[in-house]
Amino acid sequence: MFESLSDRLDSAFKNLKGEGRITDLNIAATVKEIRRALVDADVNYKIAKEFTDTVKDKALGEKVLTAISPSQLMVKIVKDELVHLMGDDAADFNAKGAPAVILIAGLQGSGKTTFSGKLANYLKKQKKLSPLLVAADVYRPAAMEQLRVLGEQIGVEVYLELENKNPVEIAQNAIRDARSKNKNVVIIDTAGRLAIDEAMMTEVANIKNAVNPQEILFVVDSMTGQDAVNTAKAFNDRLDFSGVVLTKLDGDTRGGAALSIKYTVNKPIKFISSGEKLDTLDVFYPERMAQRILG
Ligand code: GDP
């Protein structure tokens, strides 16, 4: 993950090796290389520029302590700014309610259904909750079947209404069902399309209005770079979601989505998914991610 970005940042810091202190002159090449590395990792130019301007100001403004070299200082400043860019602290996830309702939205293929299964598994095992998964994709029987199979694997009940074509009704009925069975969290997997489309947005917005979710998680494939950020913006404009789930971080992803989404939509990344297995879900910690990027 983010290998190219890590290598490029590392080589940028090497520019400062052997320098006694940071000056306008010796920092210029480093900052330029950092900016290029970010842009090549699919970070939008404006964000990359703002990022490096801040890094430069901070570096020039700090007195170099004798114990810390200019390159070490630069690594520290870049790390702090990466953490800040990704949202500083880990975000809360609200699974409290009677039941708590979690709405899952995103494009088809982003990893929504897989994530719904992983989240149910995580809430069951780590939080000792009793989840109900809801298949609200009424257009693709295969998606319902996929969720049913996932539920079976993790021992979580899946709510299905094979004949009902109204996802709002399915969601409402599922919540009633959950209440009657003392399930304390309901995870609603909604239908996605291959591209942003008005009918899909209206449908998810209707479900949101009908069920009043504690959390609306927007799932996005991290491999899609700047498209991921644009899609996030479109979904957030319509849904005002509460958090982002980045998927496929086990692939050859460049980092742009992880680094730019918080800045662009001002919503935190809450979970990262890195594999097809059901236990490959992690809470997102900006600090850990920055550490991984810097190696
Ligand atoms: P949906 O259409 O949004 O519900 O997407 P799916 O959950 O069906 O996922 C689409 C494809 O991506 C499937 O083949 C999944 O196995 C795969 N997938 C989902 N999440 C991940 C992940 O984190 N890593 C990898 N490598 N594959 C994933």
Image (cartoon, rainbow, N blue to C red):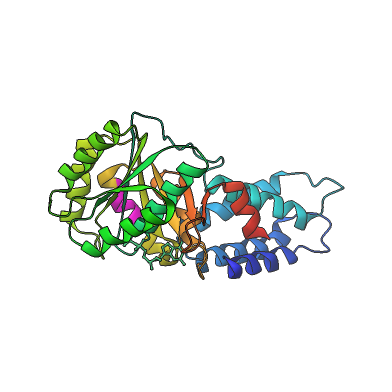
Q: In the picture, which quadrant includes the C terminus? A: bottom right
Left or right: 39 as drawn, with respect to 60: left
Figure quarter occupied by ligand 1: bottom left
What residue is shown at x 51% (from left), y 69% (from top)? 40
Front residue of 48 and 147: 147
Find the residue positioned furthest to the top.
Answer: 98
Of 58 and 182, nearer the camera is 182
- Say which quadrant the N terminus sits in: bottom right
- Tell me residue 63's x, y (percent): 78, 44
Image location of residue 190, percent across then percent down:
26, 52
Q: Is 284 one of the magenta-colored residues?
A: no
Q: Is residue 232 magenta?
A: yes
Report which quarter residue 185 is drawn in.
Answer: top left
Q: Residue at image x 28%, y 46%? A: 237
Between 2 and 102, the one lying in front of the other is: 102
* Bounds of the magenta segment: 230-236
Residue 189 image offset from top left, x and y in percent: 30, 51
- The image position of residue 158, as x and y in percent, is 30, 49
Residue sitting at x 37%, y 34%:
184
